[in-house]
Amino acid sequence: MSFLAAGSPAPDFSLTAVVSKRSISPSNIPGQLLLIFHGYQAAALVGQTIRNIRHVYPDPRQLLIASVADMRIVPRLLRGMAEKIMRDAYHQAAARGATAVHRLRLQVGEMSGVETDLLRSAYETFSDRSICADAVLEIVPVPVRWGCPACGTEVAAGNALRCAGCGGPARLTAGDELVLERIEMEVPDV
Ligand SMILES: [Zn+2]
């Protein structure tokens, strides 16, 4: 590992924001750049630190702050899920011209395979400095339900998973979903 002497120009590099896809490099920022490298568990602490720095340097043209999170230990699947939630919220907020997102409500099925604590950590990392930075993530568990695709009869879980009406095999009708059910956002008066 080598270190640059203080005051020497930074080497060229480029970082792409996870959600906005905005690219940051020393050549395309107008002022100074502060990079904060951290693990994903520190996302909340880093978010608070950045808000504190923003009080002193409110103008991003003067000081641009980017948090660079190490996501290697977050399972790839969860990373993808958190990224998709953020992208959906971002597009819905952008389409409505929202200035802030206050709350996201997510349906997570009991059999979706999603570890909700890890998903929350991944979300906090991805939402940092995005339009969802202060949005509460509400996770609504969805119980497992089975039904008969042939006649529509509901089949009680734990039974033989055969339809009592026609004897056909049951299929999962709920409990494997991961759905962004509701977004509460602030839309300016027009
Ligand atoms: Zn049936």
Image: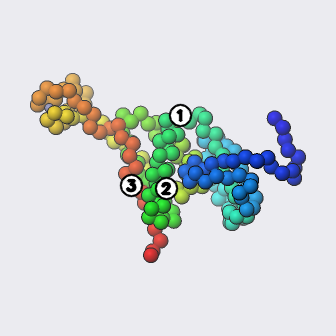
Q: Residues within 10 Å of mark 3 (few under 14, many from 20)?
A: few
Name the kind of residue labelled 2 in the image: Tyr
Mark toward the start of the polypeptide (2 vs 1):
1
Q: Residues within 10 Å of mark 1 (few under 14, many from 20)?
A: few
Q: Residues within 10 Å of mark 2 (few under 14, many from 20)?
A: some
Name the kind of residue labelled 3 in the image: Arg
Mark toward the start of the polypeptide (2 vs 3):
2
* SS assignment at label 3: strand
Residue at which label 1 appears: 75
Q: Quadrant of ligand 1?
A: top left
Seen in the image, is 122 located left or right of residue 48?
left
Question: Residue 140: x and y, percent?
Answer: 38, 46
Name the kind of residue labelled 1 in the image: Pro
- Residue at horizontal 42%, vertical 57%? 183
The total number of labels drawn is: 3
Answer yes or no: do the residues labelled 2 and 1 have beta carbons within 8 Å? no
The foreground one among 143 and 86 is: 86
Considering every residue shown, the one lying at the far bottom of the view is 190
User: What mark, if any, has residue 90 been given in the picture?
Assistant: 2
Seen in the image, is 51 located left or right of residue 114?
right
